[in-house]
Amino acid sequence: MAAPKALDVKNLSVTLGGKKILQDISFSIDEGDFFIIIGPNGSGKTTLIKAVLNLLPYTGKVSLFGKSVHKRAGLGATVGYVPQKFDFDRTFPITVAEAIDVALQKGLRAPEQRKERVDDALGQVGMADYAQARIGALSGGQVQRVLIARAMVNQPKIVFFDEPLAGVDVKGEKSFYDLIQNLKESQKLTVTLVSHDVTVVNLYADKIAALNRTLVAFGTPQDVLVAQNIKKAYGQGFGIFRHKQCLKKDPQTQSPQEGERCRLFGE
């Protein structure tokens, strides 16, 4: 018997305020996939993530590892979520460790077990030395890593990232992708990530969905990142520019190596 899909979406539609935001979206990804959703602003990427997480009303069917998200008993620890924005009072006296501890599932009661989980999550994102630092004193990049640690602390099977790279420069972008790729491999994660462009998508993604209120294309980077799909998703004035001074996956080791990079451009 085949293993259930990590994420299976069938005929998903979302209507908010009388306006159709998403129409008849269907796709599925396997356990261990690095799945990236691309599309222009207003295409419904964030709405799709929130619907999949049962944070918005929708029609259709969504299941995670064979379980309907409408019946989420037992799914809580399976899923991690890094939101697009994280607004907090930087003057509030809470440490990094405390901010992560409050995200732990309630079933973990022993203080030593909780501390071990928190320390492990911080170590995974390179923030072990900041456990007792006040979160309000961290840089934007450090806060982002704390948010990832919060998502990882319950040892999820799948983590959703909603446009975590907004406002991040290319150097920071690559560092982020390298971190997520490392977590995916070391923790055997399935990753679903919303991106605002295609800059390094082809270097890391196993599957891509191009979205613009409907599903324009779904498949491997080679299948999706072609002129026809990009123009359909972003408009006739857009295309793909490819250059060689970047990284891609080695086909044998799946680790980054020198190779081609895609960037979206407006004609």
Image: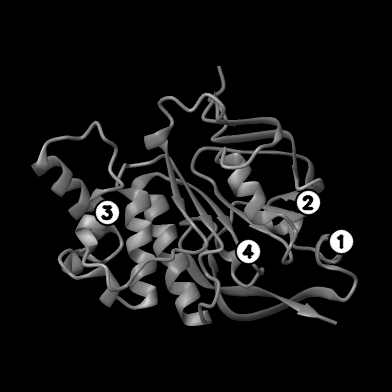
Label 4 to label 1, Cα distance in Å? Answer: 18 Å
> In the rendered picture of this protein, how many numbered marks are placed on residues?
4
Which comes sooner in the sequence, label 1 or label 2? 2
User: Please, what secondary structure does the residue beneath circle 4 have?
Assistant: helix
User: Please, what secondary structure does the residue beneath circle 3 have?
Assistant: helix
Residue type marked 2: Ala
Residue type marked 3: Ile
Q: Quadrant of residue 44?
A: bottom right
Residue 145 versus residue 57 in the image, above or below? below
Q: Depth check: 159 or 99 in front?
A: 99
**Contact, CB < 8 Å: mark 1 with mark 2?**
yes
Q: Residue at x 38, y 66 (%)?
A: 88
Quarter of the image that includes the C terminus: bottom right
Q: Badge 4 is on which residue?
A: 202
Whether residue 153 appears in this view of the structure is yes
Q: Depth check: 189 or 93 in front?
A: 93
Q: Badge 1 is on which residue?
A: 232
Left/right of residue 56 with respect to residue 44 in the rendered view: left
Label 1 to label 2, Cα distance in Å? Answer: 9 Å
Q: In this view, which residue lies farthest toward the left?
A: 112
Q: Give the label on residue 100, or none.
A: 3
Which comes sooner in the sequence, label 4 or label 1? 4
Q: Residue at x 35, y 47 (%)?
A: 187
10 Å crowding of disc 1: few (<14), some (14-19), many (20+):
some
